């Protein structure tokens, strides 16, 4: 297939745009991706720094994502999985909490963990069982409230909410007050209950790299910002006009709103991710570690090199620390506060750890407070010849970015062939 003089233009080279491009390529439709950044991938980037692999913000791939299993070659990503469950810091010590049905050896530790009452544990098991029943898309037809309101209505104690759900779900949505949608909470619980949190061996950027590898290189143009979208063209920042059979807007929410001239997108929530290097030690755990005390800047910690050794040089470990939001203090003060808390948790050896890099990600995720759209039924067609994919009228996350990209491509194909707009039923079954 050769590039067309009047191709479909995809604005944005994140994984939604790349999934759309791969689907269009499979349909035999020529296209061009215009990406403003220096490389594709959107928020999924991995930097090489002093022999370490630093994902721009702590991220994982959930193996239970249906669309990831459909679109990605997971075996080629060489996934390495975190241990099932989490270690939670409460009252000066760490306790392991895991689903005893999936990890029976953690049963006693889970029962002893001071996260709440025995009744809380039963409620959590029943909730996990409930959200795993039926089709995935049914979760987004359930009544909606904030996660906090939902958990209280389910009967969870304040201790269980503060010590488990706030650091866990708050960390997923970057929302320490867990005001995100109860539908998102159900979905997150289902993904963790039915799959594993994993890292590609060579960093999260392996995901967009795999997607773009299936496209002709001349179809991908980086360092190219779009000023506006016309009826049958796009106008670049430098004033050039490019003809287009159709346009797909696959940018983050605020940029999509600008290009489409629509109401402003949802507010963003921020994440600050700090990386440290240290000498490798046997005690570095393969778990996600949560702050159940709620004190200090740290929300969660991980040792990515304990999961995939390629994340650190031989004999060294990589430490990832997530602070929710964008703290006001400068980087030097924040590093010191974080390192002091790490020393309180792990002992004086932390002062021998060295700071590698701090990422302040101002638009890490859109706010996911209710009301939320049903991501199983994305709104892909804006007007004749203009389509969107990604977070626009959907939810953030790899699953929904990949799905919205595929659905946008199918809707665009129907448009080019003169078919009526595709009616999305919400089913996540693949063809």
Image: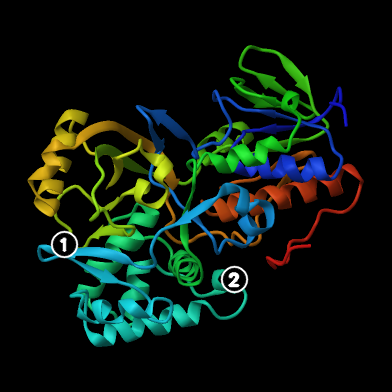
The quadrant in which the N terminus is found is top right
Alpha-carbon neighbours of circle 2 within 10 Å: few (<14), some, or many (≥20)?
Answer: many
Residue for point 62% across, 20% down:
224
Q: Which mark is residue 20?
A: none
Q: Where is residue 302 shown, x and y percent of the image?
A: 31, 51
Question: As drawn, is 25 to the left or to the right of 42?
Answer: right
Residue for point 45% across, 61% down:
370
Alpha-carbon neighbours of circle 1 within 10 Å: few (<14), some, or many (≥20)?
Answer: some
Q: Where is residue 220 shown, x and y percent of the image?
A: 69, 27
User: Mark 2 or mark 1, which has the lower sequence index?
Assistant: 2
Against 121, residue 235 (above or below) is above
Question: As drawn, is 29 to the left or to the right of 237?
Answer: right
Q: Where is residue 175 shown, x and y percent of the image?
A: 33, 54
Residue under label 1, please give it. Answer: 293
Q: Distance between the Cα atoms at labels 2 and 1?
A: 33 Å
The quadrant in which the C terminus is found is bottom right
Q: Which mark is residue 136?
A: 2
User: 420 or 25, which is in the foreground?
Assistant: 25
Question: As drawn, is 409 to the left or to the right of 93?
Answer: right
User: 301 or 149, which is in the foreground?
Assistant: 301
Secondary structure of the residue carrying tag 2 is: helix
């Amino acid at each position: 297939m050769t590039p067309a003089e009047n191709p479909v233009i995809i604005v944005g080279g994140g994984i939604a745009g790349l999934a759309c491009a791969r689907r269009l390529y499979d349909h035999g439709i020529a296209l061009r991706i215009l990406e403003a950044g220096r490389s594709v991938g959107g928020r999924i980037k991995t930097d090489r720094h002093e022999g370490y692999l630093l994902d721009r913000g702590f991220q994982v791939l959930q193996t239970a994502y249906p669309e990831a299993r459909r679109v990605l070659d997971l075996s080629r990503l060489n996934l390495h999985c975190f241990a099932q469950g989490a270690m939670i810091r409460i009252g000066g010590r760490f306790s392991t909490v895991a689903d005893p049905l999936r990890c029976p050896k953690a049963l006693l530790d889970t029962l002893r963990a001071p996260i709440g009452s025995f009744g809380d544990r039963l409620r959590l098991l029943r909730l996990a069982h409930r959200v795993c029943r039926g089709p995935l898309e049914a979760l987004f037809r359930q009544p909606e409230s904030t996660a906090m309101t939902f958990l209280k209505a389910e009967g969870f104690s304040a201790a269980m909410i503060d010590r488990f759900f706030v650091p866990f779900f708050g960390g997923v949505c970057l929302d320490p007050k867990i005001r995100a949608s109860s539908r998102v909470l159900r979905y997150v619980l289902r993904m963790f209950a039915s799959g594993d949190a994993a890292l590609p061996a060579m960093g999260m950027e392996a995901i967009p790299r795999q997607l773009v590898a299936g496209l002709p290189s001349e179809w991908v143009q980086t360092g190219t910002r779009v000023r506006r979208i016309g009826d049958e063209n796009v106008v670049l920042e430098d004033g050039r006009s490019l003809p287009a059979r159709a346009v797909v807007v696959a940018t983050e929410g605020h940029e999509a709103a600008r290009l489409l001239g629509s109401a402003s997108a949802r507010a963003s929530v921020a994440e600050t991710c700090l990386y440290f290097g240290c000498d490798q030690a046997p005690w570095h755990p393969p778990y996600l570690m949560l702050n159940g005390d709620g004190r200090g800047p740290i929300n969660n910690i991980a040792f990515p090199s304990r999961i995939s050794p390629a994340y650190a040089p031989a004999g060294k470990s990589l430490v990832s620390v997530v602070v929710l939001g964008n703290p006001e203090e400068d980087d030097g003060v924040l590093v010191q506060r974080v390192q002091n808390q790490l020393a309180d948790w792990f002992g004086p050896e932390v002062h021998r750890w060295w700071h590698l890099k701090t990422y302040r990600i101002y638009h890490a995720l859109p706010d996911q407070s209710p009301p939320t759209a049903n991501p199983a039924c994305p709104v892909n067609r804006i007007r004749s010849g203009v389509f969107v994919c990604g977070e626009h009228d959907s939810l953030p996350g790899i699953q929904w970015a990949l799905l919205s990209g595929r659905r946008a491509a199918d809707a665009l194909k129907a448009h080019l062939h003169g078919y009526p707009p595709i009616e999305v039923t919400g089913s996540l079954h693949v063809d």
